Image: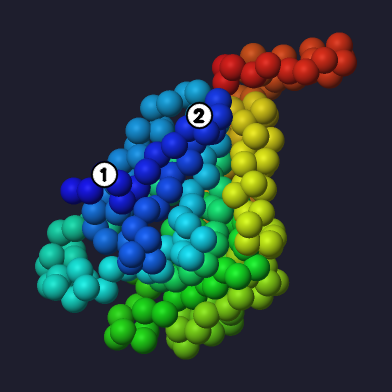
């Protein structure tokens, strides 16, 4: 297992960076890389001091899909026993905000990884796509499900059925990307946003993220109930009291996540 395939960095207080580091393979996601991403996010779940995470690759690729060489050697039973969904779930279940900073290719499993993130920032040269059909398979880590929820049935059909790539600007027009910047500004902007998030009440961020992710699968009445209950929990938090006091006293607030 190469620990260097996925690098965990802590550039500033309260911020972590998960960096995909397989440049010779355009950051293709082999089983080792997926396992390490899951391990890093499981480790981060236990870190109360980390309030925002950036996941990124390099200037040529965020992640250019699955490792086809490895996949070609797997039988259906091998793939089943690998339980790829459990590895992605470790990332999807992370409770605090995650920013995907995307340059270059975000294809297949790489695009699925970006879609698990909460905010996607892309360089103008980034390219997104679900090209699995071109190698005789289909998206298998949320590409048919998260994508339709993000961009609607017809855009999801077009991307998944044709395997085409789209530009960062088109991905933004679809609703898949939040911001498009010059390629060399992506990580700078991601860090700026991570700082903004890290300065906010962490319990509030967690409850907002949970409600937005889980509410759409409920009836409207149930989802509004979830929202109200979350609001009631936050009203009793120390951070809410600190935010109110800081506002009234015209000073900066210090949040403890309590």
Q: Where is residue 77 shown, x and y percent of the image?
A: 12, 67
Q: Residues within 10 Å of mark 2 (few under 14, many from 20)?
A: some
Name the foreground residue: 102 vs 23: 23
Foreground: disc 1 or disc 2: 1
- Mark on residue 81? none
Residue 59 visible in the current orientation: yes
Kindly identify the residue that appears in the image at 13 percent across and 65 percent down. 78
Name the foreground residue: 68 vs 46: 68
Q: Where is residue 179 shown, x and y percent of the image?
A: 69, 59
Pointers 1 and 2 in contact (C-beta within 8 Å):
no
SS at mark 2 in the image: loop
Q: Is residue 79 left or right of residue 116?
A: left
SS at mark 1 in the image: helix
Locate residue 130: give its quadrant: bottom left
Label 1, label 2: how far apart the Cα atoms are: 21 Å
User: Does 106 sit above or below residue 33?
Assistant: below
Kindly identify the residue that appears in the image at 47 percent across and 88 percent down. 162
Name the foreground residue: 134 vs 86: 134
What residue is disc 1 on? Answer: 3
Q: Where is residue 71 shown, x and y percent of the image?
A: 22, 71
What residue is disc 2 on? Answer: 50
Kindly identify the residue that appears in the image at 46 percent across and 64 percent down. 61
Q: Where is residue 208 shown, x and y percent of the image?
A: 62, 39
User: Does 218 sit above or below residue 230?
Assistant: below
Q: Is residue 209 left or right of residue 78?
A: right
Q: Quadrant of the C terminus?
A: top right
Locate residue 125: give its quadrant: bottom right
């Amino acid at each position: 297992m190469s620990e260097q395939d996925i690098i965990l960095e802590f550039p500033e207080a309260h911020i972590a960076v998960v960096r995909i580091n397989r440049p010779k393979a355009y950051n293709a996601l082999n089983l080792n890389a997926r396992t390490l991403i899951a391990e890093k996010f499981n480790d981060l779940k236990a870190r109360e001091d980390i309030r925002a995470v950036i996941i990124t690759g390099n200037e040529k690729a965020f992640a250019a899909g699955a490792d086809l060489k490895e996949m070609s050697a797997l039988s259906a039973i091998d793939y089943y026993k690998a339980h790829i969904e459990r590895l992605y779930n470790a990332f999807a279940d992370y409770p605090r905000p995650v920013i995907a900073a995307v340059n270059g290719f975000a294809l297949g499993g790489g695009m699925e990884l970006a879609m698990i993130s909460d905010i996607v920032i892309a360089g103008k040269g980034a390219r997104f796509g679900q090209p699995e059909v071109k190698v005789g398979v289909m998206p298998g880590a949320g590409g048919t499900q998260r994508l339709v929820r993000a961009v609607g049935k017809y855009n999801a059909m077009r991307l998944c059925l044709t395997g085409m790539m789209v530009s960062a600007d088109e991905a933004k027009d679809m609703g898949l990307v939040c911001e498009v910047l010059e390629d060399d500004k992506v990580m700078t902007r991601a860090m700026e946003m991570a700082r903004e998030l890290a300065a906010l009440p962490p319990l509030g961020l967690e409850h907002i993220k949970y409600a937005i992710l889980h509410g759409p699968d409920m009836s409207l009445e149930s989802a509004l109930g979830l929202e109200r209950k979350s609001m009631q929990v936050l009203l009793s938090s120390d951070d809410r009291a600190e935010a109110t006091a800081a506002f009234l006293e015209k000073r900066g607030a210090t949040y403890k996540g309590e």
